[in-house]
Amino acid sequence: MKLLVTGGAGFIGSAVVRLAVARGHQVVNLDALTYAANLANVAAVADSPLYAFVRADVRDRAALDVVFAAHQPDIVMHLAAESHVDRSIDGPADFIDTNITGTFNMLEAARKYWQAAGRPDGFRFHHISTDEVFGSLPVDPAEKFTETTAYDPRSPYSASKAASDHLVRAWFATYGLPAVLSNCSNNYGPHHFPEKLIPLVILNALAGRALPIYGDGSNIRDWLYVEDHADALLLVATKGALGRSYNIGGENERTNLQLVQTICGILDRLRPRETGTYADLITFVTDRPGHDARYAIDPTRIRRELRWRPSVTVEEGMERTVRWYLENESWWRPLLELNGVGHRLGTGAP
């Protein structure tokens, strides 16, 4: 089976690429190599005869037609997206172009290829999205996002992903394009770009810098280890029911403060500071505009229909993650020089 993975040099996409190749799938990795992409993320499979890389941008429709014609995929896994909420607040245009127009281009290129090939039964278009499209939940643990939760995006990022979800559903209903969707909770793990909370905290802690936490740290997220997510995505892509969406969650809810304290505790054990603890570096900063209070996934559908559930707790996954960053300084050190990394973004200032 041949997979076309867009955004395959990014954080989640590269986990999908590595796992798919390990399972014997042919993989074409289509990536524009924007700031958060890194071919080092797929170095482990780069020399495999099952792997091919194409540098192309989902905003370039003509390039997409060439890729489909040349590689003739059985399944498309569309992960290419701008994904950092703070950057979307400061500069929403890139999110509209990539996440909405880029998804439209992918849908049209896939539809053209699928129709020209005689509408093969095995073809699938899997769109990977986020639980942030559903908005914010109350603290009540009984309330969780399901596949029928109404959309209520609160940031330019989540609004752009909501729009792309709607496009995919429309192409399934209008044109019959065989599509499935998935919406995931917050991912973490190795190869996570250091603008995001967990790698930012790890690397700031190692440098002895402040560990910034928005507001009072009470915002709650459901944390999903990226390799668990990759496993779920391959299941949805190959076995999910057409026209269905699947919510993928880690079943590991933590407040941001609890999460940072967990990281600090692991670092205290693995690489103690000369004086004090890493938690001494925790600093509360002005909250992000429109910051959602809580996300939580109800994974009943994927558990029941596809027999999937996460394999690690957040404590186990966080231990693996911290150890990976401690052992892979050569991966993350050059990234600290990139624009916006290590600086406060998303203030909403003009």
Image: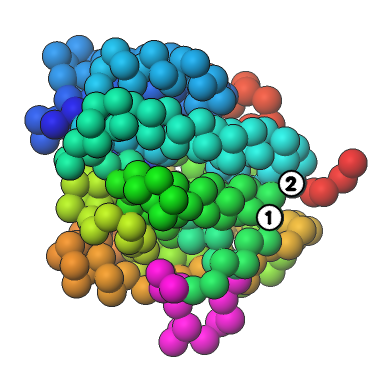
Q: Give the quarter of the figure containing the C terminus.
A: top right
Question: Where does residue 179 sit, x and y in percent of width and height?
Answer: 33, 48
Q: Quadrant of residue 330?
A: top left
Residue at the image point whose x is 50% and y is 37% from the top: 103
Residue at the image point whose x is 33% and y is 52% from the top: 180
State left or right for residue 46 relative to residue 208.
left
State left or right for residue 80 relative to residue 212.
left
Judge the density around disc 1: few (<14), some (14-19), many (≥20) Cα neighbours within 10 Å: many
**Residue corresponding to mark 2:** 89
Question: Where does residue 245 sit, x and y in percent of width and height?
Answer: 36, 60
Identify whether 313 is placed above or below 274.
below
**Residue corresponding to mark 1:** 155
Q: Does residue 9 belong to the magenta stretch?
A: no
Judge the density around disc 2: few (<14), some (14-19), many (≥20) Cα neighbours within 10 Å: many
Between 335 and 133, which is closer to the camera in this rendering? 133
Of the residues under marks 1 and 2, which one precedes in the sequence? 2
Give the amino acid type for the residue marked by disc 1 in the picture: Ser
- Give the SS element for disc 2: helix
Identify whether 217 is placed above or below 205.
below
Tell me, yes or no, if residue 144 can be seen here.
yes
Q: Quadrant of residue 329?
A: top left
Q: Quadrant of residue 339?
A: top right
Give the amino acid type for the residue marked by disc 2 in the picture: Ile
- Is there CB contact under 8 Å for labels 1 and 2? yes
Between 61 and 200, which is closer to the camera in this rendering? 61
Mark drawn on residue 176: none
